[in-house]
Image (cartoon, helix red, strand yellow):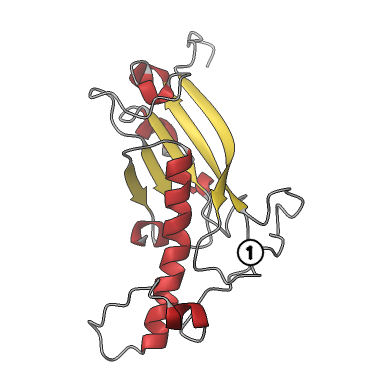
């Protein structure tokens, strides 16, 4: 180690918590229940928190308006869209810790997120709307594809509600960070979403 000269790091690391909208598939009244980690938050009834790690390769992102101090929402044509990493079941954002530096050579910005219910993100009660709820019966918020007749409608609705729970939280996070484009990669359940 003594033979290496110290270089100024071209990387910036940041831990963040992003307030996100509560997914629409959570039953009313459930959203107001405190989350396991952020129960003292003043806006717990209207937002949850999505935790993550951001790595910026300063060399690649120097010309990226999305990384500039202004609130620009477009990315440079020479800078790749940010990479967003989603972990698998029972993991968290730091599942990717060994990959962040290597991937940063190809992407100006990398975000590794803790999905709702995992890592340091909010852990709401997983009580989702299903076929038994009047909201679903009277409102076609959950669209079911009838490709597989062997699976009950109730099961399809539960799966679709669970998918919406995670996808809506990711979309809320993307909008909060003003990302018009992103490259999405995931492991296991993160790849499925």
Residue toward you, 104 or 31: 31
In percent of the image, x 26 and y 90: which residue is there?
A: 149
* Residue designated by label 1: 31
Q: Quadrant of residue 82?
A: top left
Q: Is residue 88 something one can see in this rendering?
A: no
In percent of the image, x 53 and y 61: which residue is there?
A: 90
Residue extending farthest to the top is 5
Q: Position of residue 25 (x, y in %)?
A: 49, 68
Residue extending farthest to the right is 40
Residue toward you, 38 or 132: 132
Label total for image: 1
Using a 10 Å C-alpha cutoff, classify the residue at mark 1 as few (fewer than 14 neighbours), some (14 to 19) or many (20 or more): many
Residue extending farthest to the front is 138
Task: State the SS at label 1.
Answer: loop
Describe residue 165's horizontal placement relative to residue 36 as left or right.
left
Q: Is residue 61 something one can see in this rendering?
A: yes
Q: Position of residue 183 (x, y in %)?
A: 31, 42
In percent of the image, x 49 and y 48: which residue is there?
A: 95
Describe residue 115's horizontal placement relative to residue 43 as left or right.
left
Q: Position of residue 13 (x, y in %)?
A: 53, 28
Image quarter (top left, top right, bottom left or bottom right) of the C terminus: bottom left
Q: Position of residue 14 (x, y in %)?
A: 55, 30
Name above or below for residue 61 compared with residue 8. below
Name above or below for residue 152 compared with residue 71. below
Q: Quadrant of residue 150?
A: bottom left
Name above or below for residue 143 compared with residue 10. below
């Amino acid at each position: 180690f003594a033979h290496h000269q110290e270089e100024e790091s071209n990387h910036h690391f940041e831990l963040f918590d992003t307030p996100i909208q509560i997914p629409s598939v959570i039953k009313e009244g459930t959203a107001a229940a405190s989350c396991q980690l952020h129960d003292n938050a003043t806006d717990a009834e209207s937002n949850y928190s999505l935790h993550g790690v951001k790595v910026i390769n300063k060399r690649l992102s120097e010309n990226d308006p999305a990384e500039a101090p202004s609130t620009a929402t477009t990315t440079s044509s020479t800078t790749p869209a940010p990479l967003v990493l989603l972990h698998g079941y029972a993991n968290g954002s730091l599942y990717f810790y060994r990959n962040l530096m290597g991937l940063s050579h190809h992407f100006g910005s990398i975000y590794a997120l803790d999905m709702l219910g995992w890592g340091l993100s909010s852990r709401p009660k997983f009580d989702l709307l299903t076929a038994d709820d009047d909201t679903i019966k009277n409102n076609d918020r959950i669209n079911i594809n009838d490709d597989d007749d062997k699976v009950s409608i109730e099961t399809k609705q539960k799966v679709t509600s669970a998918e919406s729970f995670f996808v809506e939280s990711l979309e809320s996070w993307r909008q909060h960070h003003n990302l018009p484009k992103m490259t999405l990669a995931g492991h296991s359940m993160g790849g499925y979403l």
